């Protein structure tokens, strides 16, 4: 357990940003007519960032301008010391001064932006803002927008990083109301819970004097998770050197994130605009903490994937565990388990911890041999999953689906080793007084305290279950019954034989119709197939006719008895032994009174039509399972374990899934039929009375 007591109610002074956000939104309305509402962000986000930088630099602006006039070649690093930040602006203009020369506003505004240090100019260029200056100027919007922003107070002394984060949050929420459900913004209440959980244990080292602590978010968004982690650690250890790293693909979110990191004094080089699926921007660095909320249900492969992603993912997978995706590739329609693998790859090998939000799919999707199953198996076998916490629904602004926090660790405390903790926190929330999009619920400080306690106590109760890792690893066995079939030539069995496709190698009516009616020109192979079918049509028809003429109720209990009879019936149509065997099989049905069939060595042959699959927990004996679950119902059943990892294409029959909800399912006794009947009669009487009153 941690030697340090951490207050989980930290940093919870209510933050009201309604004044600032409403003011910014009123500026957005000035764009109406020139811009569609979904394009307001093309102007508003760059202007917020520019104004934020201007306000931060206000107190040292004149000193920077004077130094620049004195020596235009003054080194950038030295100029940063003058400005007090990792950025500066050498232009004599401010937004307020630009308004004084409306005739030259566009040119002067560009001059003002060019006065920023290169790192800020890169942010503004990434948003393609130059085009918006032209567009606003031509449509008489530029003056009113610049003037309004010049009156907005975004000074870090009055609007700290936390409050600015909330302003960004609200803007992003408004701009993202029509975004895809998988591309969601994470509310600060969720982030605080994640940080609490992440740092609740195994983190005594963060209190060391001048400790360097690295934190990575591979889907950084506007940097909310990084900022919240930073604030938490600095609250308890002001001497800590917290270094923040992030990757983000959305240009607006990236720009906001870099802006806030610069104001925090973080190295902007550690925030990269890059698709995490394509590249790891920090390949030589492992992280003390990874915290992220990757997109749900976003494809990494196929026609809907972003350009270049599928190739990059497959190339990384080819590296095995020298790359990030060595455990396997999930279905191409969802990259969540790739983010989890990448997080594990980035976690410090000695102390690394991660908190990642996922939806339900990574817990159970995919069959036994699927990439999803094998990735879960790898995580469990390597004891990397510390806990999975089910969150309340309706927590996100634009999706109401169920979500989970995966807590990963490379340094579990002794009590947790070899175990996984499941926490059902779905009922621990407070209703918002007013819904924000799909966000109807929030995790209050008290809720966060309760959930963190469930995690840290590591004790079983109604909302917390603890299991060995092997609970979720299973083997897939095949179960079959001995081959016992009776044979007969009846109309019913002839129809069953045809539906099985026993004669499809000879003639297939459906395929012939498809080829004959094809609107496209047939290939040479298709023409050959059609010709063969047509040549065999008379044999096909003869076989069916002969069988129908031989319709008989006599039943044969072994193929040895039946094949001579069948050969004689069809002697004028075919003598092909393989075809006769197929026909015999098609005319057979399972019959426990029939002879058990054996191969030439006397071994029992098992009926593939009785094949069933049994999922058996890894540590359970198959014999015990069969005795309990199968043999009481099918006494002659036999199990087979068909795994063969030595093949070129291995046959994998050991997998893993975490069916979370099953472990918290509570049986609810249905209402007695008498009670339901009484209620139905009452409703019927009520309806009849209302109809009578309605029609007098």
Image: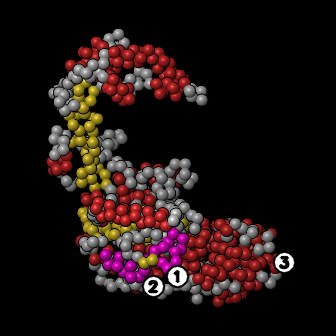
- In the rendered image, which quarter is residue 424 located in? bottom left
Q: Is residue 32 visible?
A: yes
Evaluate if marks 2 and 1 touch, with contact meaning CB atoms under 8 Å apart: yes
Please tell me the numbered disc located at residue 11.
2
590 left or right of 399? left
Residue 291, quarter of the rendered image = bottom left
CB within 8 Å, label 2 to label 3: no
Can the viewer see residue 349 in this picture? Answer: no
> Does the magenta segment cover residue 444?
yes
| Mark 2 burial class by Cα count in 10 Å: few <14, some 14-19, many 20+ | some
The residue under the point 28% across, 62% down is 674
Q: Is residue 141 left or right of residue 187?
A: right
Instruction: Give the residue number, with chain letter if any, for mark 1.
Output: 162
Kindly state the secondary structure of the residue where label 3 is placed.
Answer: helix
For residue 208, which numbered disc appears in the image?
none
> Of discs 2 and 3, which sits in the foreground?
2
Quadrant of the drawing holding the N terminus: bottom left
């Amino acid at each position: 357990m941690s030697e340090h007591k951490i207050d989980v109610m930290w940093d919870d002074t209510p933050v009201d940003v309604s004044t600032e956000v409403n003011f910014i939104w009123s500026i957005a309305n000035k764009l109406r007519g020139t811009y569609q509402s979904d394009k307001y962000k093309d102007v508003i986000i760059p202007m917020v960032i520019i104004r934020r930088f201007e306000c931060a630099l206000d107190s040292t602006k004149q000193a920077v301008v004077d130094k620049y006039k004195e020596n235009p070649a003054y080194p950038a690093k030295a100029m940063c010391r003058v400005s007090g930040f990792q950025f500066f602006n050498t232009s004599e203009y401010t937004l307020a001064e630009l308004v004084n020369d409306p005739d030259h506003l566009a040119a002067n505004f560009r001059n003002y932006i060019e006065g920023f240090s290169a790192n800020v100019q890169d942010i503004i260029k990434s948003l393609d803002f130059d085009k918006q200056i032209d567009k606003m100027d031509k449509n008489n919007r530029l003056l009113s927008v610049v003037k309004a922003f010049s009156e907005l107070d975004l000074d870090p002394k009055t609007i700290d990083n936390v409050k600015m984060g909330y302003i960004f949050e609200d803007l992003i929420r408004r701009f993202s109301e029509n975004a895809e459900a998988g591309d969601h913004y994470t509310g600060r209440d969720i982030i605080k819970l994640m940080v609490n959980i992440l740092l609740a244990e195994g983190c005594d080292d963060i209190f060391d004097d001048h400790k360097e602590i690295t934190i990575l978010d591979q889907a950084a968004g506007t940097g909310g998770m990084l900022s919240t982690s930073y604030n938490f650690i600095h609250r308890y250890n002001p001497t800590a050197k917290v270094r923040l790293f992030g990757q983000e693909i959305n240009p607006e979110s990236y720009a906001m994130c870099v802006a806030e990191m610069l104001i925090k004094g973080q190295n902007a080089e550690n925030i990269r605009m890059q698709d995490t699926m394509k590249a790891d921007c920090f390949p030589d660095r492992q992280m003390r903490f990874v915290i992220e909320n990757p997109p749900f249900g976003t494809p990494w492969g196929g026609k809907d994937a972003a350009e270049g992603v599928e190739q990059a993912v497959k190339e990384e997978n080819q590296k095995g565990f020298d790359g990030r995706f060595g455990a396997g590739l999930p279905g191409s329609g969802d990259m969540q388990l790739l983010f989890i693998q990448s997080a594990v790859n980035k976690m410090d090998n000695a102390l690394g911890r991660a908190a990642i939000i996922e939806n339900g799919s990574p817990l159970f999707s995919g069959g036994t041999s699927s990439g999803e199953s094998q990735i879960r198996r790898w995580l469990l076998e390597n004891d990397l999953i510390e806990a999975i916490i089910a969150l309340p629904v309706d927590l996100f602004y634009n999706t109401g689906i169920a979500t989970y926090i995966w807590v990963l660790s490379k340094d579990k405390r002794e009590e947790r080793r070899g175990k996984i903790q499941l926490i059902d926190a779905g009922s621990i929330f407070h209703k918002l007084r007013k819904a924000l999009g799909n966000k109807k619920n929030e995790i209050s400080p008290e809720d966060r305290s309760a959930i963190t306690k469930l995690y840290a106590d590591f004790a079983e109760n109604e909302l917390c279950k603890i299991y060995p890792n092997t609970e979720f690893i299973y083997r897939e066995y095949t179960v079959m019954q001995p081959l016992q079939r009776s044979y007969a030539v009846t109309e019913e069995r002839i129809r069953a034989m045809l539906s099985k496709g026993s004669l499809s190698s000879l003639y297939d009516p459906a395929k012939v119709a498809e080829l004959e009616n094809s609107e496209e020109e047939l290939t040479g192979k298709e023409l050959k197939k059609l010709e063969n079918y047509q040549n065999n049509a008379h044999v096909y028809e003869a076989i069916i006719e002969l069988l129908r003429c031989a319709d008989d109720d006599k039943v044969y209990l072994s193929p040895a008895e039946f094949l001579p009879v069948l050969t004689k019936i069809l002697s004028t149509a075919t003598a092909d032994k393989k075809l006769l065997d197929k026909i015999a099989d098609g005319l057979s049905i399972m019959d426990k009174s029939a002879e058990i069939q054996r191969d030439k060595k006397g071994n029992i042959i098992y009926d593939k039509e009785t094949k069933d699959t049994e999922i058996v927990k890894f540590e359970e004996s198959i014999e015990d399972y069969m005795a309990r679950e199968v043999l009481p119902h099918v006494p002659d059943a036999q199990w087979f374990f068909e795994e063969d990892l030595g093949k070129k294409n291995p046959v994998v029959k050991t997998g893993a899934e975490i069916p979370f909800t099953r472990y918290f399912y509570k049986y609810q006794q249905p209402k007695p039929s008498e009670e339901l009947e009484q209620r139905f009669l009452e409703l019927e009487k009520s309806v009849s009375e209302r109809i009578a009153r309605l029609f007098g």
